[in-house]
Image (cartoon, helix red, strand yellow):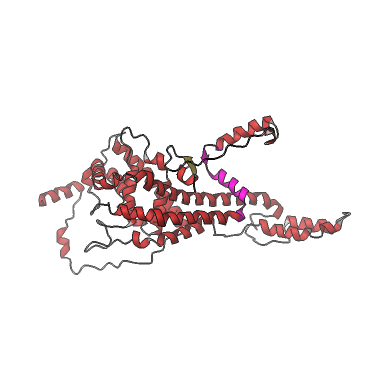
Amino acid sequence: VNDLFPSFNYNSYTKRFIKNPISFGEEVVRENMPKTKFEYLLYGNKQLNLIYNSHLELYKDYFGVEHIKSIIRIIEPNNLPLVTTEILNNAELKINNVLVPYVEELLGAMPPSSKLPRYDYLVKGCIGYFNGKLADIIQYPPLQSDVFQHYKEFGNTVAFLYLLDHGVKSIENERFLLTSPFLGTTPNNYNVSIPSEEGKIYKACLNFQEYNTSKAPEILGDLVDTAWRVDNLYRITPNNKNSIFRISLRKLAEAICAVSYEWANGIPEEGAVLPVEDTTEFYRLYSALQFIYCSPPERGQGFDSYELFGDSMLWAGATIIHFLGQRFRFKAFDFSFHIINVHDAVGGVEKDSNEDKFIQNASRVRDVMEHIFLLLNSNVPYTFTEFNVIEPPEDDDFTDNFQIVSSLRESNASLYSQK
């Protein structure tokens, strides 16, 4: 919480946390490793020390599943609920005390109308359109050092819980592979969750006790009972749908739903079903932040947003949008995704230009966001509790305002002729 979340960026492709090139938080001061005159006792001798140090150098510059599994082995799985509870409490405090005030302040800087521009603007015109609309947010002084940073920390929380669950399942699979020969587990009986008298370890201990010639038979009196308990302990539970990540997401959903009134109170315009042009819903604000995130840095600025915040900010935005039930609105009205659609339909972007870099960043962001949405929905699907009833028009007079054309060029010509 004090070091990994503020100082590392998560990469969704490698599932690793990488050290941030620029730290926006306080540096954690650690004591030096204790020195001893008997360092050769660490791995046995000097040669083994060199071999193990060379091997461990591969895991030195990042934090990933390998480190998660080491943590689980040290603190033991029985203590993981304490760890996850502390992490979730910290995330809830961040939502209520940090993210809510920033969202309220930034929503006040959103433009009165944020409808998507026409395809006639082309990519360069659309980027300039949104730069002008979002000028107040872009010029907000603590945008990166505070807003993006806190979203990154919240996203790192979700990503860490995902890796923690992945590490637990990986250890369980390793244990299953090691114990299945002793339990007599085969593809035909792997889903048996209770001990069986046909288990190899139980039958071996039963035979050993029956034909025992030990001089101290009382020592082996509980051997069969112990074998039965071991069989029960190491058998897998079939169709076990509980996981740390799924339970943690439900806790986060409760914290997010507690502030949903402030982040999901969009009012449709007159005659509209959904708030499209003027909305104060969270997904529209996050679209603005994501547009700034995808924008390449100005000349001489150095690092871009991906190098400073990684995919962590995307995990935060996707998690909040998913549990607010705004996923489909976000995908339909997001600023960056709209510019990608304009590029796919019209093109006209020079290679290695700022517009081309924006399209590359936005395309990668869209792929990562889709992956996160699918992951969240597979663990905690969002269920719609409210439905909008769309009444049919009273008559067909409104159709006189529309004309069926065969191409975009013909549509533009018709529009200009009317003007």
Residue 121 lies, with reference to residue 376, above or below; the image says above
Q: Residue at x 28, y 35 (%)?
A: 350
Q: Is residue 311 left or right of residue 419?
A: right
Comparing 147 with 401, the one in front is 147
Comparing 336 with 284, the one in front is 284
Q: Residue at x 17, y 57 (%)?
A: 402
Q: Quadrant of residue 265?
A: bottom left
Q: Is residue 70 magenta?
A: yes
Q: Is residue 17 left or right of residue 221?
A: left
Q: How far across and how far down the image is residue 70, in percent? A: 60, 45
Q: How far across and how far down the image is residue 75, in percent? A: 61, 50
Q: How far across and how far down the image is residue 138, in percent? A: 29, 44
Residue 18 lies, with reference to residue 161, above or below; the image says above
Q: How far across and how far down the image is residue 324, in percent? A: 38, 59
Q: Quadrant of residue 236?
A: bottom right
Question: Which segment did they paint magenta?
Answer: 59-78
Residue 65 lies, with reference to residue 267, above or below; the image says above
Whether residue 332 is visible to the viewer of this picture, yes or no, is: no
Comparing 45 with 338, the one in front is 45
Q: Residue furthest bottom?
A: 394
